[in-house]
Amino acid sequence: MKRAPLTQKGANRLRAELEHLKSVKRPQIIEAIAEARAHGDLRENAEYHAAREQQSFTEGRINELENTLANAEIIDTSKLKPGSRIVFGAIVELQDMHSDEAVRYQIVGDLEADIKQRMISVSSPVARALIGKSEGDTVHIDTPGGRKSFEVVEVRYEE
């Protein structure tokens, strides 16, 4: 089985979520179930059913996080020495050649991609077009809105 890449920062974020679910959320749910049981008949007890549903969701997320972390290949981007070349973990600033608009992305693993935070998956078309390029290179990317051209303005890696 192929191990999914994950940045150290992403792994730390997932570990923090896992710890929160185990040490805070799980005890809260157990307490809510116990309180709902004390109300009597469980067949028509909405609080009990809601707490059990929340417990099921939380336990599923805990299992998902544990499996993700166990099967991930954690890559410490601070130890990479690619120079100005774009590789996994790079934070890339691009300049649109037509509109002069600047955008910044970080190339991360599929498991931590979040476009709202400008973190794109290494397997995305944009990231695949960027991998191997260097500062000053021009990149042509096919998008749903047509072909776009960008200049790679800056490539950096977080410590």
Image (spheres, grey):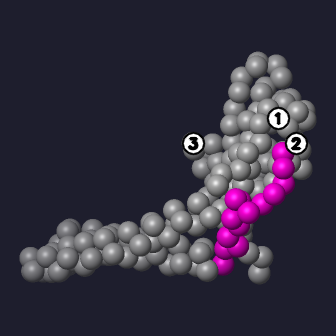
- Magenta-span inclusion, residue 17: no
| Nearest the eye: 104 or 55 | 104
Give the percent coordinates (x, y) of residue 131.
85, 50
Residue under pointer 2: 134
Q: Which of marks 3 and 2 is nearer the N terminus?
A: 3
The magenta span reads: 71-84
Label 2 sits on a secondary structure element that is loop
Q: Earlier in the sequence, mark 3 or mark 1?
A: 3
Tell me how far mark 1 sits from mark 2, CA to CA.
7 Å
**Residue at horizontal 67 percent and vertical 74 percent from the top:** 72
| Nearest the eye: 29 or 53 | 29
| Nearest the eye: 83 or 104 | 83
Quarter in which the C terminus is drawn: bottom right
Q: Do the residues labelled 1 and 2 touch (CB within 8 Å)?
A: yes
**Residue at horizontal 76 percent and vertical 18 percent from the top:** 99
Give the percent coordinates (x, y) of residue 55.
34, 74
Tell me how far mark 3 sits from mark 2, CA to CA.
25 Å
Q: Give the residue type that dot 2 points to.
A: Ser
Residue under pointer 1: 152
Q: Which mark is residue 116?
A: 3
Q: Give the residue type that dot 3 points to.
A: Lys
Give the percent coordinates (x, y) of residue 124.
77, 51
Whether residue 53 sits left or right of residue 33 in the image: it is right
Rendered position, 158 above or below 99: below
| Residue 149 at least partly seen | yes
Label 1 sits on a secondary structure element that is strand
- Magenta-span inclusion, residue 78: yes
Label 3 sits on a secondary structure element that is helix
Q: Give the residue type that dot 1 points to.
A: Val
Tell me how far mark 3 sits from mark 1, CA to CA.
21 Å
Rendered position, 78 above or below 65: above
